[in-house]
Amino acid sequence: MFDPTIYDNLKVVVEGTIYELDFSGKIKVTNRQDIVDLATMSRKFAMRFQAPGTAASYPAANIILQAAMDDLAAEMIAGEGKQAGCRLTVELFTKVTHPEKECAEMAKRLTALWNGRPLITQKISYVYGSNEPGVNRILLDFNRKINEDQLEDIPNLIDYSFQSLRILNELERSRSET
């Protein structure tokens, strides 16, 4: 028998919270990844979801939990001196046709929702020569490690991610109406 790591405990809470919301019909889970990278001795867990009734692939949210070898070693070796924990990030994906205008509005509304806490970075990608809208990958980075002390914060973080998705859906609807 082994003691579960911080990563294992956080993963169970993230996964359980998201699946509860999926089961209740509040969100729709569209992808799940559980990766052990033997080359870097790291772990990554991600769940992607959308608002129910979303026909296209966008907007979508992705909750990502990662633990590197240093994180796992700091937890296993007593007195390591490094802070043991995991990184938790949120990715949001949506389509954009007018990046200057739309990205500014997204940044304003997401910053207000999250109260300026995570660093919000937007990266636009598109196929050159195509008339299709570009894809905006919005990364919300809290720039710190979390551990079991933050277990109670995870449902709120997932709820804020869902609210972020609602903002993107509202902006998507208003864009398609114009």
Image (tube, rainbow, N blue to C red):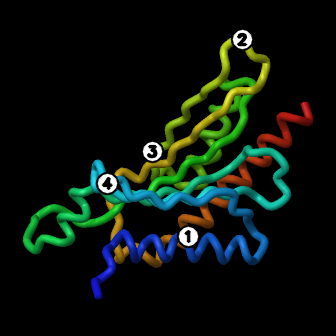
Instruction: Tell me how far mark 4 sits from mark 2, CA to CA.
Output: 39 Å
Query: Between disc 1 and disc 3, whose residue precedes?
Result: 3
Marks 1 and 3 close (CB-CB < 8 Å): no
Disc 2 from disc 1: Cα separation: 41 Å
Residue 107, x across and y down, in percent: 59, 39
Amino acid at the residue labelled 3: Leu
Would you say 43 lies left or right of 2 here? Answer: right
Tell me the CA gap for discs 3 and 2: 31 Å
**Distance (Cα) linking label 1 and label 3:** 18 Å
- The x, y position of residue 9, in whole percent, is 40, 77
Choose mark 2 or mark 1, whichever is in front. Answer: 2
Q: Is residue 123 left or right of residue 97?
A: left
Q: What residue type is labelled 2?
A: Gly
Q: Earlier in the sequence, mark 4 or mark 3?
A: 4
Query: Nearer the N terminus, badge 2 or badge 1?
Result: 2
Q: Nearer the viewer, residue 92 or 32?
A: 32
Query: Which element carries disc 1, helix, strand or loop?
Result: helix
- Tell me which amino acid carries mark 1: Asn
Q: In this view, does 83 lie above or below 1?
A: above
**Residue placed at 29% from the left, 48% from the top?**
39
* Residue 10 picture quarter: bottom left
Residue 34: image location, x then y, percent: 48, 61
Q: Write down the residue under mark 3.
A: 119
Q: Nearer the viewer, mark 4 or mark 1?
A: 4
> Which residue in the protein does label 4 denote?
38
